[in-house]
Image (spheres, coloured by chain):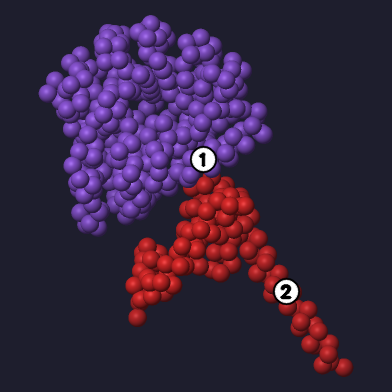
Chain colours: A purple, B red
Amino acid sequence: MIKEPRLSDPKKQLDFLSNGIFNEEGLLLFKDQLRLLGPNVLNPLKLEIFQVNLGYMCNQTCKHCHVDAGPDRDEIMSRETMQICLDKMEELQVQTVDLTGGAPEMNPHFRWFVEAIIKRGIKEIIVRSNLTIILANPKYHDLPEFFKRNGVRVISSLPFFHASKTDRQRGKGVFDKSIRALQLLNGVGYGSGSLTLDLVYNPGGAFLPGDQGELERDFKKALRKEHGIEFNRLFTLTNLPINRYLEYLVASGNYEDYMTKLVEAFNPSAVTELMCRNSISIDYRGIIYDCDFNQMLEMPIETAAGEHISNLSRSSLEKREIQIGQHCYGCTAGAGSSCQGSLI
Amino acid sequence: MEKTYYDPADLKKFGDIKEWEPKLAEKFFDYYNSVFEEGALTAREKALIALAVSHAIQCPYCIDSYTEACIEKGVEEAEMMESVHVAAAIRGGASLAHGVQMMNKAKKILM
């Protein structure tokens, strides 16, 4: 078993992920795996999705969190940076703005930002809500109404349809609060009709997600029968070996088996569908990354125009080389994985 | 001789049985994969049956595989353990049911 007590430094994580079994056991580095598929398999496409991370503060401290989010994180996007994001999303005519965190609702400018995005004519706004935030404080109780009024699409994490597995991953009592929040969202019309409520499943341990369609069927059946809850779609996400989840893998002696599994499950047809090709991820300072995971590993985009949103142009983006590492195997395993579920 | 009869790494080599007899191996793997596709039973139900059978035949490779398959498919711990009890009940029941054969024989030969 590998002993590596502290992996919070992104550089240490990247170094850790590029050595060990990738040398000793002869596992192919992700870049070499891509090279076998031929040139330009991971070239950028037209930008469609702006994923904006409004900050790492969160009311929960989930065991698997790749953001390392929690109540003690004070990195928060300022209104000035939001203003630059607004100008750029309009200029670049993006289709979707995907707001994430932490708990994005905890950013004091969250509501202003959502309303401002709508005024810019963006077709779709996604809010990745952890659900419990709705009940965390009276000032958040009206979030379901706020989401409805602004036509926001809500995507929420719910690792399982029973309490034990959910609470084990997300904290004691989270399941009951999540159920209550889902009922509140259903109460204003989410989960049916034009208000979309999607759920996200990610494995509560060192294993890959099962078939998305089958899990969705089980989730729908159980949540409807036991709690009267309706939702639109379930997205299955693979846990990527970074931050808290990487620490868990190492500490539990699962790291080598898990990485080997990801590499062996590499699916070439998932590569062309990867979301880093048509999305960017923006951190609280306005620095741009190819995806949220690269953000957490502090691997900004490399373009001639630099890495800050204020310098972003479509041409520089489309000429960039997407930054990759061994963590990318998490998005190409099996049916593939993205912030909107499996890829194939 | 190997130090142990079972090595977890050997599970990944299962496909190597093709090396000495490809045709039969291919037929077997085709059949195997078809069996586990969703049909009248869901893939989840099949994984749970496979887990119970794995215990009945005491195959360590199968126990590893189908424990993981069940977890991936959202099977809960209590369901998995109940399936092991089903295997145990059938195995135990099969032994005990043969007690009737014993009784029949004993009764026949005893005065």
Q: Chain of mark 1?
A: A
Residue drawn at the location 46% of the way across and 68% of the way down: B27
| Three-letter code, disc 1 | Gly
Q: Return the residue at label 2.
A: B96
Front residue (pair B104, A281): A281
Determine the image quadrant of residue B95: bottom right
Picture quarter containing residue A86?
top left
The residue closer to the viewer here, A71 or A149, is A149
Q: Quadrant of the C terminus of chain A?
A: top left
Q: Residue at the right extreme?
A: B111
Q: Residues within 10 Å of mark 1 (few under 14, many from 20)?
A: some
Instruction: Give x and y (percent) for residue A138.
Output: 53, 12
Give left or right: position of B11 versus A168: left
Image quadrant for the N terminus of chain A?
A: bottom left
Tag on residue A213? 1
The dot on residue B79 is: none
Q: Label 2: state its secondary structure.
A: helix
The one of A24 and A200 positioned closer to us in this rendering = A200
Q: Can you name the residue that lies furthest to the left here?
A: A304
Query: Which secondary structure, mark 1?
Result: helix
Q: Residue at x 58, y 22 (%)?
A: A192
Q: Is residue B82 left or right of residue A135?
A: right
Residue flagged by tag 2: what amino acid is it?
Answer: Leu
- Residue A263 in sight here: yes
The residues tagged by marks 2 and 1 sit, at their Cα atoms, a distance apart of 43 Å
Q: Residue at x 38, y 75 (%)?
A: B21
Q: Quadrant of residue A190?
A: top right
Mark 2 neighbour density, 10 Å: few (under 14) some (14–19) many (20 or more): few
Q: Position of residue A285 (x, y in %)?
A: 25, 18
